[in-house]
């Protein structure tokens, strides 16, 4: 009995962090976003914000347009989509706009989005918005990641020129990495991280990662 | 003294019980390798989840994406509806096999109670049916009748979501209340020191004086020697009143619709094929039910096996089984509270 009880208590102990700490149990993405982004720089060479253009897949586009009135059927003006854009940016706040920036290794915060609107073209909605950095920074090494940690949304960088630097100093070099790059290595590292309990940087490995080096 | 066969029986019993609990946990357990169990950031993409789970995720993702194009195709070509139904069915099966709290709650409930596999199957089908119904009703009322916006619909979904988590927590609390009494009773009555003395040595020889020797009628592992225990009789649970309890399980799990079904329904409605969306939703539910029922049956069988094997031993088996039930009841409560407080996020409601 002792033995059995011990196992049982062990099981319970094992179970509680599993049940409580399991975090987000996402099954698979329900929304697909094709993203292109611009990193906006001030004349002094500091980065001031990120401007996103996110195009939604057709299922979500249809869902989002449900109940939105338009003068012409199948055509939506920017004004008609205004309230929806408002809802979008308000909802995205909860998820930190799925945009995670680090300047020289330090996490940067974003202010509320500005210049946001929706555009309906070719059966797809595109959300445009700018995330101003709370404090513009000059960074030797800047990284911006776009991903949904819970993977409800699958972010994919647009095929062509997904990332642009706007007004960046000439010496700055930009690279970006798509999540499927280097998966094998990431998987291995992930397991190691998990086993050692140090996986604070784990999710970032599968993000769309943009890095800008300004010497 | 213990014989070797008894040791073996116990080892298998523990294994079976562990399997039952792990199955009940499966939602959480499956995602665990993929993410930080302690609240850190989680991975942002699919490929990191390797093996079977990764494959399941990839498959259902594939099926899900195919749905929208198939619905579009069905507008001009009626036969595409059959493809849609086939995809929906496959999606349902795969979707339920992935992480999710629904089957975790149902399995835990079945393990916590003296439920039969047959009832497990019935509960799985009933809750999946209810889940489909709720999704159809939400979209029919909000989108079709009221032409409400996605924002309104997602508000309704959110309200239902919170209600369903609260229901799971309340349901879990009730299970813990009844099962906990029995477990504590079983612990206290014979040997209160057992838990504390859970050290490295065996006490197999100590148990000759147990009063809880129920293996003669081994489906009665409850503890009738403790007058203060108010747990329901197994016969009660198996009888017609059990169905009322079972209904709470259906309600707690089934009331929350699947975000995927809602998206598909709205999309089908916009394409003028609402009926096809409804059919797809129910077929999806059928697929889900099959998977959940399978998991439920495994959970129940594992528990039965554990009970039979531990029943072969002296009273300790009863204590052990009560513990397993208590653990399963605790899991339902943990799931409910975890979901409610956001520690465990189920499939997100589509609000963007």
Image (cartoon, coloured by chain):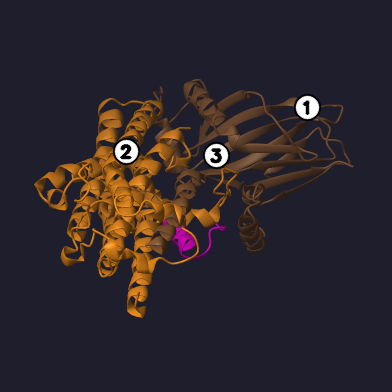
Chain colours: A brown, B orange
x, y percent for residue A204: 65, 47
Q: Which residues are magenta?
A: B47-63
Mark 2 or 3, closer to the camera: 2
**Residue A37: quarter of image:** top right
- Host chain of mark 1: A
Q: How far, Cα to Cα, is label 3 from label 1?
A: 27 Å
> A147 or A104: nearer the eye?
A104
**Residue A61: quarter of image:** top left
Q: Pointer 3: what residue?
A: A55
Image disc number at residue B236: none
Q: Pointer 1: what residue?
A: A136
Residue at 58 percent of width and 47 percent of height: B42
x, y percent for residue B170: 31, 35
Asked if the magenta segment contains residue B53, the reply would be yes
Main SS of the magenta segment?
A: helix
Q: Secondary structure at mark 1?
A: strand
Q: Is residue B169 above or below residue B193?
A: above
x, y percent for residue A182: 67, 60
Q: Is residue B175 shown left or right of residue A155?
A: left
Asked if residue B94 shows in the view, the reply is no
Q: Secondary structure at mark 2?
A: helix
Image disc number at residue B173: 2
- Host chain of mark 2: B
Residue at 18 percent of width and 55 percent of height: B119
Q: Residue furthest bottom?
A: B4
Question: Callout 1: 10 Å neighbours few (<14), some, many (20+)?
Answer: some
Mark 3 or 1, closer to the camera: 1
Do tag 2 and tag 3 residues touch (Cβ < 8 Å)? no
Residue at 58 percent of width and 49 percent of height: B43
């Amino acid at each position: 009995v002792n033995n059995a009880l011990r196992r049982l208590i062990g099981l319970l102990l094992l179970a509680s962090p599993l049940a409580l700490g399991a975090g987000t149990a996402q099954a698979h993405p329900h929304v697909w976003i094709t993203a292109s982004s611009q990193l906006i720089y001030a004349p002094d060479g500091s980065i001031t914000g990120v401007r996103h253009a996110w195009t939604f897949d057709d299922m979500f586009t249809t869902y989002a347009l449900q109940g939105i009135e338009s003068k012409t059927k199948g055509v939506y003006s920017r004004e008609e989509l205004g309230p929806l854009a408002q809802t979008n940016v308000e909802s995205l706040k909860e998820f930190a706009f799925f945009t995670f920036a680090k300047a020289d290794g330090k996490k940067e915060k974003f202010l509320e989005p500005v210049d946001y609107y929706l555009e309906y073209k070719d059966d797809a909605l595109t959300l445009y918005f700018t995330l101003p950095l709370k404090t513009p920074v000059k960074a030797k090494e800047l990284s911006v990641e776009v991903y949904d940690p819970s993977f409800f949304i699958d972010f994919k960088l647009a095929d062509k020129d997904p990332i642009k630097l706007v007004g960046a100093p000439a010496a700055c070099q930009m690279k970006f990495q798509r999540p499927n790059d280097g998966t094998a290595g990431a998987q291995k590292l992930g397991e190691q991280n998990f086993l050692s309990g140090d996986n604070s940087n784990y999710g970032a490995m599968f993000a769309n990662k943009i890095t800008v080096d300004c010497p | 003294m213990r014989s070797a066969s008894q040791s073996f029986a116990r080892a298998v019993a523990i294994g079976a019980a562990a399997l039952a609990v792990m199955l009940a946990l499966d939602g959480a357990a499956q995602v665990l390798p993929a993410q930080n169990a302690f609240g850190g950031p989680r991975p942002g993409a699919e490929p990191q989840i390797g093996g079977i789970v990764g494959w399941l995720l990839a498959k259902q993702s594939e099926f899900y994406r195919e749905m929208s194009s198939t619905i579009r195709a069905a507008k001009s070509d009626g036969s595409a509806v059959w493809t849609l139904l086939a995809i929906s069915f496959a999606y349902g099966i795969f979707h339920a096999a992935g992480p999710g709290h629904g089957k975790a709650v149902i399995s835990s409930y079945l393990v916590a109670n003296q439920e039969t596999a047959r009832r497990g199957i019935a509960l799985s089908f009933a809750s999946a049916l209810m889940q489909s119904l709720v999704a159809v009703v939400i979209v029919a009322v909000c989108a079709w009748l009221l032409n409400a916006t996605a924002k309104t619909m997602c508000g309704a979904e959110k309200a239902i979501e919170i209600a369903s988590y609260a229901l799971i927590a309340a349901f879990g609390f009730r299970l813990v209340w009844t099962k906990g009494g029995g477990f504590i009773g079983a612990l206290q009555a014979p040997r209160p020191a057992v838990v504390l003395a859970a050290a490295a040595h065996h006490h197999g020889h100590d148990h000759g004086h147990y009063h809880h020797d129920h293996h003669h009628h081994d489906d009665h592992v409850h503890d009738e020697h403790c007058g203060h225990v108010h747990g329901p009789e197994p016969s009660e649970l198996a009888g017609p009143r059990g169905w009322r309890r079972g209904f709470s399980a259906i309600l707690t799990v089934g009331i929350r619709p699947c975000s995927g079904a809602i998206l598909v329904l709205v999309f089908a409605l916009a394409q003028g094929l609402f009926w096809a969306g409804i059919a797809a939703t129910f077929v999806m539910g059928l697929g889900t039910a099959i998977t959940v029922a399978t998991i439920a049956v495994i959970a129940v069988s594992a528990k039965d096996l554990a009970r039979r094997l531990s029943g072969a031993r002296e009273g300790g088996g009863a204590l052990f089984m009560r513990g397993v039930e208590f653990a399963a009841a605790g899991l339902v409560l943990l799931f409910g509270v975890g979901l409610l407080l956001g520690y465990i996020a189920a499939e997100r409601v589509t609000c963007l």
